[in-house]
Amino acid sequence: NAGVTQTPKFRILKIGQSMTLQCTQDMNHNYMYWYRQDPGMGLKLIYYSVGAGITDKGEVPNGYNVSRSTTEDFPLRLELAAPSQTSVYFCASRDPKGDEQYFGPGTRLTVT
Amino acid sequence: QKEVEQNSGPLSVPEGAIASLNCTYSDRGSQSFFWYRQYSGKSPELIMFIYSNGDKEDGRFTAQLNKASQYVSLLIRDSQPSDSATYLCAVRDGNNRLAFGKGNQVVVIP
């Protein structure tokens, strides 16, 4: 099992550009999450999904969009990138019957 | 807005000592509580979870929960240099979402 994988690992965007952060899990988990972590801070929930076709906003959804067409994939779309979106982005998944959220390795995004 | 507070600054402990971390939460209806460890530049990894009032021990780690006072703590006994990391407290709500504190950095001095 690869667990949760994220691509890319690093990205530099110019203000106003768009990009998609990819997240894939091979554990057949229904629950998936996107977080951002700013320096010295905890994780803030952006969006989450409890299954294919179902998504919902978290604490900080503005400027982002998600889709969940399959159980495995949960891409995060940034439209019109802003410097405030400079952060490390983590994707996670969880089996509804389990306790642990499994995190991907993260994507470090810089918007200049 | 559900809040999870970890207000202590960096904690330096000598090797072999006990490190004590505290966390308070605002949502009295919270049922599940988690401690994650995060090494610099890495993703968080779960080290403990607790549901019931009292203590839960796993190796050198003990989680303590007091729902009446709305706090959860983590003790690390016999601290090792490999325990140097940031420890994140997290609380799960009724919609299966985790709210995280900002973390406490622990530095174990050999």
Image (cartoon, coloured by chain):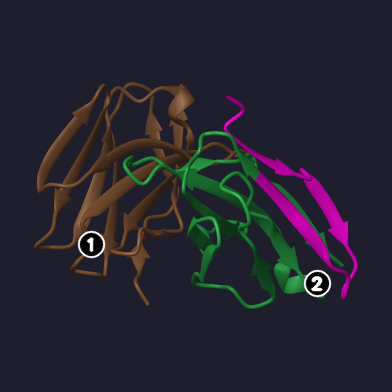
Chain colours: A green, B brown
In the image, residue A75 sits, relative to residue A72, either above or below, namely: below
Q: Which amino acid, mark 1?
A: Ser
Residue B100 falls left or right of residue A8: left
Q: Chain of mark 2?
A: A
Residues at discs 2 and 1 both on one chain = no
- Residue at the disc numbered 2: A81
Q: Is residue A11 magenta?
A: yes
Secondary element under disc 2, as helix, strand or loop, is loop
- Residue at the disc numbered 1: B30
Secondary element under disc 1, as helix, strand or loop, is loop
Residue B37 falls left or right of residue B95: right
- Percent of width and height locating residue B3: 35, 69
Q: Is residue A18 magenta?
A: yes
User: For the magenta stretch, what is the residue range?
Assistant: A1-23
- Percent of width and height locating residue A112: 87, 67
* Residue occupying the point 60% across, 44% down: A72
